Image: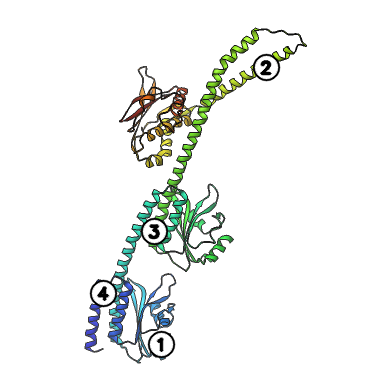
Amino acid sequence: MNDLSRSSAIDTLYRISSLAGKTEDPREALALILGEIVSIFGAGSGSIALINPDSGHLEIEVAEGLSGDDAGMSLKPGVGVTGWVALHGKPLLVRDVRTEPRYFRIRDSVRSELTVPMEDRGRIIGVVNIDSDTPDAFGEEDLKFLLLITAEATRVARNLWLIQQLKTKASQLESVLTIGQRLVSKLELQEIIDSITLEARKIIACRLCAVFLTAGETDHMELYSVNGDSGSFAGLPPLSIDESSVGAAIRRKKQIEVLDLLKTEESLPVLQAIRSEGLISLLITPIIYDGEVIGVLNAYTSHPHRFNDEEKRLVAAMASLGAVAIQNARLYARVFQSEEQLRLTERLNALGLLASEVAHEIRNPLTVIKLLFQSLDLQFPENDPRARDGAVIEEKLDHLESIVSRVLNFAKSSEDVHSRCTLQGILRDTLILMRLKLEQARIRLHYEEPPDPLEIEGNPEQLQQVVLNLVFNALQSMPEGGDLFLDLKKVFHDNGTPRVELTITDTGCGIPDEVRERIFDSFLTGRQEGTGLGMAIVKRILDSHHGSIEVLRSDIGGTSLRITLPSPG
């Protein structure tokens, strides 16, 4: 190479170094770099081939002087001069390709070839190759300069790839944050799971995404959502954990990558769906909540693909966000179920209260009727039909008394099932049920649990019903949101008797004046949609526990109620 060529090479190095400021597209930069190389060496053609991380093959990224078919070639490492350089990481100068057995013919007119590896931090990532139609067109000096230029070109390309990766990562992270915000705003379980598969497929550009959730206590998983051209997946039966590749991910609670699905042990319906959809590789990500696997997020590709660390992290982030959203939806459903159950319990309790009141009212006149009937001492001849009528009347009076007694005994039987428990535990369980309801109603909860257990004797389910009723009333008095204060403590009366007190204070609209004095009466309500039974049931339950409830204050600034229960110690 003459001095002019050396000067041109130095100019080329400068131009290559300055490419980073002219373009942010790595492929465009590689094309410009190749054009500079072909020009300075006077080559007839040239190419830059990169190693595909999925297949391990060399694939031509940019080319000059090659036909369309030749530019799309893919070579295994070791095949041809280019493949040999990629495999061994050493440059190769071929002065005459007709005497080189490793040469893989691309253009018939090629006579000499110069090939050098692209090395990035000790790893071969590609190959730069130039050809000439003249034998012995390149020499050792050319080889040295091409190595120097390729090293600089690799540095520039690496920096542009890094910039591109950072931009992609920033975009993906922004997408994940947006997805997270969308997920936590949804409350319907199916809508959440459909969003997970849709967004996961977007951020990693896979062929198909699916979510399977555990089916209760069984060893099966059910398909809840699939996104992609997935007609074959729609009818999949419950998936056996032991007969599927998802089992390892569930047991180990870690991501599992499957390069070739057809080589795994899958059930026949799954294999048929895989073949029908043309799926090859799979990334299984467990959906974990509170240390337990509640499902898996599967990402499928239609070509052999090794998922990189970035893809795995993004899918793992999606699975984590999905786990929280799924559990929130389930808890929200439980709250609504609890509300419905509470309404049913209120109606049943009201029915029981009404039945016991009616039975009690019937018993008094029934007793009078029976006593008066017996006092008549009616004696009729044996053959007189009135004797039979009198016996029937007495029998039916006994029957009515038996019915009344059974109603009264049934009404008080449920109250006798008492056990020792803590009011902290009852309150804690109630707040867990109410957590999502409080968030949805924009209620700020202020509660600090006492460190020492505050024990009481009672029926935990009935006492939880008391707290639920009072908290629901507080929520309904704050339709625009507000603050809810809970104060739980142990006090001693003047005679030294220990008592447990729970004060519930809200910042709502207060109790209407017209009902304030009679809020504990049955069927009295200040709300159009109310049953008028809630506070009556609360009072009745507390009375059965030898407790009390009182209104400390109620005005436009809110309401404060205090529950008092005896403590055994």
The x and y percentages for residue 148 are 28, 79
> Label 3 vs label 1: CA separation?
44 Å
CB within 8 Å, label 1 to label 4: no
Q: Amino acid at mark 4?
A: Leu
Query: Which type of secondary structure does the marked residue at label 2 adopt?
Result: helix
Q: Nearer the viewer, mark 2 or mark 3?
A: 2
Would you name the residue on which mark 2 appears?
A: 395
- Say whether disc 3 or disc 1 marks the residue closer to the N-terminus: 1
CB within 8 Å, label 4 to label 3: no
- Say whether disc 2 or disc 3 marks the residue closer to the N-terminus: 3
> Label 2 vs label 1: CA separation?
116 Å
The x and y percentages for residue 442 are 35, 40
The x and y percentages for residue 479 are 36, 37
Q: Residue at x 40, y 64 (%)?
A: 308
Would you name the residue on which mark 4 appears?
A: 19
> Label 1 vs label 4: CA separation?
30 Å
> Label 4 vs label 3: CA separation?
31 Å
The x and y percentages for residue 258 are 48, 63
Residue 314 numbered mark, or none: 3
